[in-house]
Amino acid sequence: DTGVSQDPRHKITKRGQNVTFRCDPISEHNRLYWYRQTLGQGPEFLTYFQNEAQLEKSRLLSDRFSAERPKGSFSTLEIQRTEQGDSAMYLCASSLGLAGVQETQYFGPGTRLLVL
Amino acid sequence: GENVEQHPSTLSVQEGDSAVIKCTYSDSASNYFPWYKQELGKRPQLIIDIRSNVGEKKDQRIAVTLNKTAKHFSLHITETQPEDSAVYFCAASTRSNYQLIWGAGTKLIIKP
């Protein structure tokens, strides 16, 4: 499968625990995005990378959230001290684009997080 | 910042009829407008997109129109089929900011 993959697909954790999600983009894609989606809502932008550089972070992304893309390939999203309000689907997307050009964002299957 | 509003939240149409979903955006600098289809428990999938240098784009039974002056764009699905049932999202982004700002979604129900 050459599409965007995410791991794990489901995560149940207790409040206060740390969790880490992984995203593997389509191999030649230079841009990688993280979104969060709650039931019945559209995805909300969290952050995006161009190669290994994190170029933008949403105000939704509190200090408990951190994302990395160390070699410009896969990315990780870590949530520290999880809260029940963090329960959501975390979606990763990737695209291939030149500067100033938006290209199609292809989405992964998501990681569904439930914080008890 | 950008805000995208989408209507209606639910749309029920008879199989074979047309469906129209409308979105408005607030940032006049927005220049890229994709539409995604999301089936229950699945990832969003792009069905069509339009850039601000064109007013209309068609792909078989699906078309999108853009009115930059009024800052709204619409998705048109003709000859609807049961497999068109899903949640449809519109989104917008600007040339300087690649993040997508999404509408709240429209649940499309195709009645047999």
Image (spheres, coloured by chain):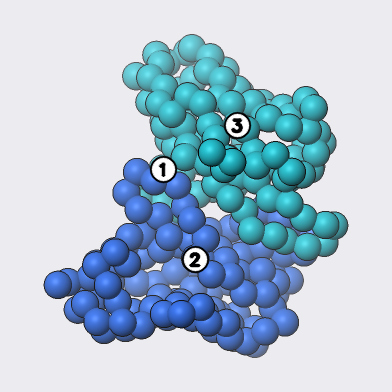
Chain colours: A cyan, B blue
Mark 2 Cα shell of 10 Å, populated few (<14), some (14-19), many (≥20): some
Which residue is rendered at x = 62% and y = 74% of the image?
Answer: B50
Q: Is residue A65 left or right of residue A113?
A: right
Residue type marked 2: Ile
Spatial CA distance of label 2 from label 1 is 22 Å
Q: Residue A70: x, y in percent? A: 78, 25
The chain ID associated with circle 2 is: B
Q: Quadrant of residue A26?
A: top right
Q: Is residue B107 left or right of residue A10?
A: left
The numbered mark, 3 or 1, whose residue comes first in the sequence reads: 3
Chain bearing mark 1: A
Q: Is residue A58 visible?
A: no
Identify the residue position indicated by label 1 in the image.
A38
The image quarter in which residue A99 lies? bottom right
Q: Residues within 10 Å of mark 1 (few under 14, many from 20)?
A: some
Q: Are marks 2 and 1 in one subunit?
A: no
Q: Which residue is mark 2?
A: B47
CA gap between label 3 and label 2 equals 23 Å
Query: Are the numbered discs 3 and 1 placed on the same chain, yes or no?
Result: yes
User: Looking at the picture, how far across and down is residue B59, in whole percent?
Assistant: 51, 78
Residue drawn where x is 78% and y is 62% of the image: A101
Which residue is labeled 3 in the image? A23
Q: Is residue A74 above or below residue B83?
A: above
Secondary structure of residue under mark 2? strand
Quadrant (top left, top right, bottom left, bottom right) of the C terminus of chain B: bottom left
Residue drawn at point x = 24 percent, y = 67 percent: B82
Q: Amino acid at mark 1?
A: Thr
